[in-house]
Image (cartoon, rainbow, N blue to C red):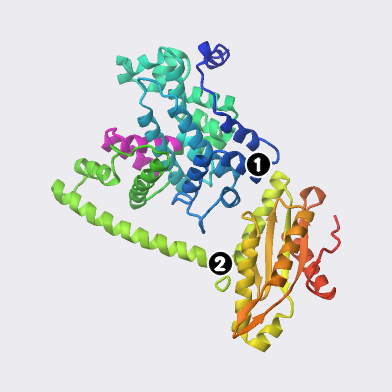
């Protein structure tokens, strides 16, 4: 039996921490074969303060959503179950440990370092790894074993004072005194709680070795780098650690010197913001300017005084910040325009196809169902011919607004083209979709559009296509064809109705 197994099986005085009930409910839902958006949203929403924090970070520069996320269902739809649950778990675990503060342990410094590591890892991973929704919480919890050992092992706090600690790494001293390192302890405790392996295993290997399993190699190296830059921001000697940080990014990942400098500045800016979300003070945290100044004072080849160097850096930083802000504004607007229909403000056809592909993948992975709704304005050409195209545009705008307000937050509504609209209704049965579509059809029928002292009224014809992966696989084009045929069947049936053609399984 390993030393950690003995600790787990002979937990003296029950001092090993356990996660709070809400964290266990979230983990339980995530481990189900078919995790549900609605059940997860309900669990998180039980804590209003947690909900507010999750939405704040979901709307932050870290995730930069195309449009503002106003509720948990939208966050789960756009960012995905993994990202949102990890954000929630991060807040829960930080708050849980801070609520049980132990005299002698600097929780504020610990979590300040941890949050900065998490932000750093998230930014580094975007440049050097494939997409990794787990990297933020993995880096946040990489040293959780230190905190657990301090709380549970009476002799652990003494190793910080030992003379040998000054000459050897913490990992080496832990191994000698207890038979395991904090990285192993943290990984096994988290696994014991039910935290997924994609988080636990990189934590186990984050101090790096030659035998890291391939799936966890890049995440382990990323959080190791994140720990180094976090140490620099929070008081460790700058030049040598910064040199190692830069050299690793240059030689292992081929990042340029300028991109690394920009990365350090982004870490500084975003860490300040995310620390505020966790209600952790950012005082005494060095700025990027101070770090780079410290390094330049010792490594710069320029014969400039400290004052000149700082002034020069400030000028360059201000210019870079301004340029970055302008670029971010332009990119945000371009992202919006790329996915938005300019007339109605709905998502456009490009976004529809992208989202449809993701919904098919999610359905295949989790076994969930969804329904596609397509509808077309009846006799729309007569509106344009009689009252002009501007009147037709106004009808489109008001139907789009009505539809968007009537559908649920998790539904995605698009202008498919001309006078035709489409909506994807995730986790919605055919019966539920028919009820939703019928309410929408009735409200459109009652809608009056004021134009040149006249009141214009229209109706719509609708078609539905239902997808259940257990009833046979269909691709996107087949489902669109089914809904489209239903729409035209409604036209033939007299318009202003809903049809669903027979689907072969």
Residue 354 placement: quadrant: bottom right
Q: Which of marks 1 and 2 is nearer the N terminus?
A: 1
* Dot 2: element: loop
Q: What residue do we see at 33% from left, 61% from top? A: 323
Q: What residue do we see at 44% from left, 17% from top? A: 175
Residue 125 placement, left or right of 74: left
Q: In which quarter of the image is the N terminus?
A: top right
Say which of 216 and 101 sits in front. 101
Do labels 1 and 2 touch, CB within 8 Å? Answer: no
How many numbered circles are shown?
2
Inspect the magenta stretch and tell me whether residue 234 lies in it. Answer: yes
Task: Specify start and end residues of the magenta stretch as a single range.
Answer: 223-249
* Dot 1: element: helix
Say which of 142 and 209 sits in front. 142
Say which of 326 and 59 sits in front. 59
Say which of 147 and 317 sits in front. 147
Residue 134 placement, left or right of 225: right
Residue 345 placement: quadrant: bottom right
Magenta span dominant secondary structure: helix
**Residue 242 visible in rendering:** yes
> Residue 464 location, x and y as percent?
77, 62
Residue denoted by label 2: 340
> Residue 256 location, x and y as percent?
36, 51
Residue 292 placement: quadrant: top left
* In this view, the mark in front (1 or 2): 1
Q: What residue occupies the far bottom of the structure in this picture?
A: 386
Residue denoted by label 1: 39
**Residue 475 visible in rendering:** no
Inspect the magenta stretch and tell me whether residue 226 lies in it. Answer: yes
Q: What residue do we see at 38% from left, 34% from top? A: 113
């Amino acid at each position: 039996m390993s030393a950690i197994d003995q600790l787990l099986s002979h937990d003296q005085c029950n001092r090993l921490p356990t996660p709070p009930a809400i964290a266990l409910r979230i983990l339980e839902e995530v481990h189900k074969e078919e995790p549900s958006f609605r059940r997860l949203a309900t669990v998180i929403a039980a804590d209003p303060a947690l909900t507010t924090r999750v939405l704040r970070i979901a709307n932050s520069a870290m995730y930069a959503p195309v449009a503002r996320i106003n509720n948990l269902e939208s966050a789960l739809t756009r960012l995905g179950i993994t990202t949102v649950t990890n954000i929630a778990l991060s807040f829960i675990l930080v708050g849980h440990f801070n609520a049980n503060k132990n005299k002698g342990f600097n929780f504020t410094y610990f979590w300040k370092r941890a949050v900065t590591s998490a932000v750093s890892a998230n930014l580094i991973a975007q440049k050097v790894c494939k997409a990794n929704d787990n990297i933020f919480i993995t880096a946040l919890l990489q040293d959780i074993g230190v905190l657990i050992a301090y709380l549970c092992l009476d002799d652990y706090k003494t190793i910080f004072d030992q003379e040998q600690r000054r000459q050897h790494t913490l990992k080496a001293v832990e191994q000698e005194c207890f038979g395991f390192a904090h990285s192993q302890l943290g990984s096994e405790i988290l696994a014991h709680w039910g935290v997924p392996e994609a988080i636990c295993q990189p934590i186990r290997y984050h101090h790096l070795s030659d035998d890291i399993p391939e799936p966890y190699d890049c995440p382990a190296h990323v959080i190791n780098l994140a720990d180094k830059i976090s140490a620099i921001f929070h008081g460790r000697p700058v030049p040598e650690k910064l040199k190692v940080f830069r050299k690793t990014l240059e030689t292992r990942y081929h990042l340029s010197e300028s991109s690394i400098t920009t990365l350090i500045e982004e870490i500084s800016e975003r860490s300040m913001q995310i620390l505020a979300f966790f209600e952790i003070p950012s005082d005494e945290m060095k700025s990027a300017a101070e770090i780079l100044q410290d390094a330049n004072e010792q490594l710069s080849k320029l014969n400039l005084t400290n004052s000149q160097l700082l002034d020069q850096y400030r000028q360059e930083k201000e210019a870079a910040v301004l340029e970055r802000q302008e670029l971010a504004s332009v990119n945000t607007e371009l992202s919006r325009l790329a996915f938005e229909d300019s007339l109605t403000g709905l998502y456009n056809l490009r976004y529809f196809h992208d989202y449809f592909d993701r919904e098919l993948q999610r359905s295949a992975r989790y076994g969930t169902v969804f329904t596609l709704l397509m509808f077309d304005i009846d006799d729309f050409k007569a509106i344009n011919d009689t009252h002009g195209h501007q009147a037709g545009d106004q009808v489109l705008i008001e139907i789009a607004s009505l539809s968007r307000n009537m559908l649920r937050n998790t539904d995605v509504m698009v202008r498919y083209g001309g006078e035709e609209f489409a909506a994807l209704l995730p986790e919605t049965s055919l019966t539920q979709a028919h009820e939703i579509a019928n309410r929408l059809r009735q409200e459109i029928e009652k809608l009056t559009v004021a134009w040149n002292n006249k009141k214009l009224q229209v109706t719509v014809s609708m078609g539905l296509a239902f997808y259940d992966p257990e009833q046979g696989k269909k691709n996107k084009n087949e489902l669109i064809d089914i809904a489209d045929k239903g729409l035209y069947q409604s036209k033939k049936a007299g318009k202003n109705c809903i049809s669903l053609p027979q689907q072969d399984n």
